[in-house]
Image: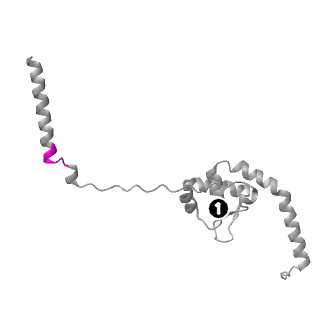
Amino acid sequence: MPEDKEISPDTAQILSEILRWSRFENFPKLRKILLDNLKTDQEKLVYELTNGENSRSDVAKQTGVPDSTVRNWWEKWYNLGILEPSGKRKGRPQKIMALEDMGIEVPKIPPKKPEVKQEKVTKAELQPTQESETQRSDEENARRKERQTRQND
């Protein structure tokens, strides 16, 4: 078995410089791939929240995008090479570059809709009161008498 050798400081510096220039050269290509494949605000938001820590259901809940759609997008983006395995949580993907770092505007997370509380109505509230029934009967009787008077005239 080969022995593990440490990289010399000079080699590390050269590798770092090669990486920096490689990123610089490929920046426009990556930006185009992101813009071509993240067309909607929802896609951009899901991509941005794919940070290696958030689960698929976390991202779905935060964005309102169905879990199955998040799964499909993640698979597509992983195959494109714009997602990579997370270094933080095993089995979760993470974006390779933040959209803001690429000069792409990140949409805001939509505010959650306030929950509408429904008041419970008791059976007593649903049943008409004696007074309203009496009032309705008096009104119906008055209309009946008026119709009869017209018919007799």
Q: Nearer the viewer, residue 7 or 149?
A: 149
Quadrant housing the N terminus: bottom right
The vertical placement of 119 against 85, above or below, is above
Q: Nearer the viewer, residue 142 or 98?
A: 142
Is residue 33 shown left or right of residue 50?
Answer: right
Is residue 7 shown left or right of residue 103?
Answer: right
Q: Quarter of the image holding residue 102?
A: bottom right
How many marks are shown on the rendered structure? Answer: 1
- Residue in view at x 14 percent, y 40 percent: 135
Q: Tag 1, which secondary structure? A: loop
> Residue 37 location in percent, x, y?
70, 50
Return the residue found at the far top.
Answer: 153
Label 1 amino acid?
Thr
The vertical placement of 96 against 33, above or below, is below
Q: Quarter of the image holding residue 82?
A: bottom right
Quick check: is 129 in the magenta stretch? yes
Q: Quarter of the image holding residue 24?
A: bottom right
Q: Which residue is mark 1?
A: 50
The vertical placement of 139 against 8, above or below, is above
Is residue 91 shown left or right of residue 23?
Answer: left
Q: Residues within 10 Å of mark 1 (few under 14, many from 20)?
A: many
> Residue 4 location in percent, x, y?
83, 81
Quadrant housing the C terminus: top left
Quick check: is 4 in the magenta stretch? no
> Residue 152 location in percent, x, y?
8, 18
- Residue in view at x 71 percent, y 61 percent: 98
> Residue 132 location in percent, x, y?
16, 44
Colouring chosen for the image of the structure: one colour
Return the residue found at the far left.
Answer: 152
Q: Which residues are magenta?
A: 127-132
- Residue in view at x 14 percent, y 33 percent: 140
